[in-house]
Amino acid sequence: MHDLKKLIAQLTLEEKAGLCSGLDFWHTKGAERLNVPSVMVSDGPHGLRKQEEGADHLGIHDSIQAVCFPAACATSASFDRTLLYETGETLGQECMAENVAVLLGPAVNMKRSPVCGRNFEYFSEDPYLAGELACAFTKGVQSKGVGVSVKHFAANNQETRRMSVSSQVSERALREIYFPAFEKVVKEAQPKTVMCSYNKINGVYASENEWLLTKILRDEWGFEGFVVSDWYAVSDRVKALKAGLDLEMPGGDRENDEKIVAAVRAGELSESVLDEAVERILKVVLDYIDNRRTAKFDRQADHQKAVKIAEECAVLLKNEGALPLKRGEKVLFIGELAQKPRYQGGGSSHVNAYSAEGAYCFAEGYGVSYIKGFGADGGGTNEERAEAIHAAKNADKVIVFAGLPDSYESEGYDRTHIDLPECQNLLIKELVESGANVTVVLHNGSPVAMPWIKDVNAVLEVYLCGEGVGEATVNLLYGNANPSGRLAETFPLKLEDNPAYLNFPGDKKKVDYAEGVFIGYRYYDSKKQRVLFPFGYGLSYTQCAYENLTVSKSEMRDTETLEVSVDVKNVGQRDGKEVVQLYVSDHTGSAVRPVRELKAFEKIALEAGEKKTVCFTLDKRSFAYWNEDLSDWYCASGEYEITIAKHSRDVGISEKITVHSTARLPLSIDDNTTVEQLFAYPETRAVMQGLLKKTRPHDDGEKMGKKDDAMMRAAYMQAPLRTVKLALNLSAEQYNGLLGMLRGSLEGK
């Protein structure tokens, strides 16, 4: 154990300030005279991007050869916590072998819009799913003695003007949508570091936001590690330090170190604040040093892991019998992506892959033929298209390898549309018109439009599935592996359907999150908007059936937990995996809420004919929403529906329960308090009914609140007290007495 306070007491003011900034692009500073070492951090949520020399943050310079695993857009589709933990373990082992102390990931920002350029690095549009998977990944990495940096905290949901724009978000949306994934990882996995985002949040830079970095992250969630800036995200170094930002990256800005020293000497910054930041940094650094060991980076073994992971991530979106392919069929692969797959996104996470062969390399043993048709860069000629159509006439089945080129989606900029390159859409259209049996394999980091969806036989979404995507795709196409992925995001029919469309990417100064909590399926499903494919959707080469949904109780207090179980049976002819999804619907009417929300899931393996029972535990957060008046999670009393479904639009099987709240919403009574608000509380309802009995003897009070005449009932229930005073002809004395009685009833007087 290190006596950190004793160590810090031996540091000079200048040394302490220096420890709060990097040595260079990828290393922390050390203090040699006190045996405090410098350690390395490295990009790579889906693969190690360790750079031996040079310094860049956007993947311009080469890094060491490493294994590129599927990006988060793909691993999220696995819906598999165990898979994410094992991926994290492997990356942690690689980091230890390469003397990397902190892996800069996972990235858990929400997919607010499908055109965010960095969506391929993010898990989902759903905070519960993102949090569960990121938590498993974090535990896996840190089990090897290496830290992670959960990023980018917070509300970093676009690349356009990301270093200056202010994300204008309600507290409810932050709490329900943009915070929970971070909260889950912090509370359950204690990441060594959290990386703050570039953007402002409601006018305050994340790096200078004390509410964000101290009150929420540390005081409320209990974060024990250090906060690091995104590279060049610090605007005012002293303000950032006061707010809770410990380490500024990259290094090289000596002026900011000097500003810290000057602020302490001028009494503008307490040296104790600086000491706390240094202590948090040293705790992580020395913990890594204490646990450092010799480890092996077995690239070949890890490559095979990448193949198996990719098989778990691919999503079968459509299949009318073309898949799985059979040996002996004349199969034609079209598209240069079959030879040169796009398996990762661009920017700071770009990995120098160990081995990245295309699907055609692994399909030659099946007698598959290949023709280019169009380029991997999105270009294509009339001659190439004509050759492909001619070649397809001699094939039993045609597999078109389509997708987005590197230039379409990358860190640093957002897409402006969700279309595939036109040459791809045109070739698919003409192949179908020629009578070809067409399957489309998609390589993309985020949703794309599919104008040909009704005409092709099958669609296999492989996302950006890492360097093993070629082999994995062939295994999936030929049925050596059974597709089991599910969409972690909604595929809209067109970009204009997206709830953020009118407010993305905002103006030069700010972006309004006007859709509030209604992002992704929460919006599409509540609005009953037609979509291309819903959240949670995915097919398989087998089928599963659900039955015997049971809940442990029909009524519960919000302080209790609820046990839910369901039987799942593989009723098909093949072994496979099923993702069982549990959604909760609030029928209380107490707040405007999405029609249903994912609150639990489990991925299970089932042999053909096998049945298993899947169990879930739900707690208050499974039913609650963030109430801004209460400044807390609130579970309204009333009816809730629990649905086990195959995706967010699936009817599934359901049970209803009643939840009784132990919390009470605050009610401030004044001239504008409505009768409806007063009727929500038994005490104030009784006062109002008593008033009516006195002033309207012909009415029993209860009847007045339940008029058959809809107009009269609405007028009564929505009337503010000042109107009630006039309608009942109350004197000033009577009215003041009423206000006193109402307020006193809530206080128990």
Image (spheres, helix red, strand yellow):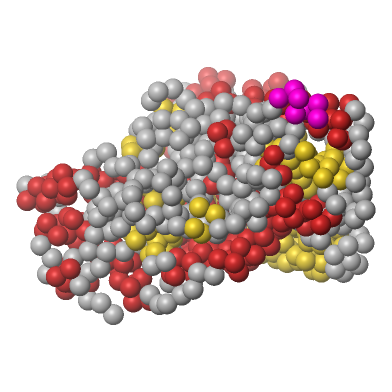
What residue appears at the point 57 percent right and 20 percent down from the top-left corner? Answer: 727
Report if residue 383 lies within the magenta region: yes
Most frequent secondary structure within the magenta stretch: helix
Work out whether 307 lies above or below 292. Answer: above
Q: Quadrant of residue 593?
A: top right
- Residue 269 located left or right of residue 72: left
Query: Horizontal and vertical percent for residue 107?
Result: 49, 50
Furthest-bottom residue in view? 1
Can you give x and y, in whole percent of width and height, for residue 659 in the image?
Answer: 66, 55
Residue appearing at x 55%, y 33% in the figure:
407
- Visible in this render: residue 542? yes
Q: Nearer the viewer, residue 106 or 738?
A: 106
Q: Position of residue 155 (x, y in %)?
A: 46, 41
Q: Is residue 705 visible?
A: no
Give the camera-side residue of 594 and 395: 395
- The answer to whether residue 277 is above or below residue 379 is below
How far across and down, in percent of the image, does residue 699 sit? 69, 30
Considering the image in quadrants, where does the N terminus appear?
bottom left
Residue 186 vs 687, above or below: the answer is below
- Residue 60 shown left or right of residue 126 in the figure: left
Q: Is 296 inside the magenta-drawn segment?
A: no
The residue at the point 85 percent across, 68 percent down is 607
Q: In the image shown, does 650 or 376 lie closer to the viewer?
A: 376
- Number of marks in picture: 0
Q: Which residues are magenta?
A: 381-387
For the point 61% across and 34% down, the residue is 377
Compared to residue 521, the image places residue 515 above or below, namely: above
Rendering quarter of residue 649:
top right
Q: As drawn, which residue projects farthest toward the left? A: 266
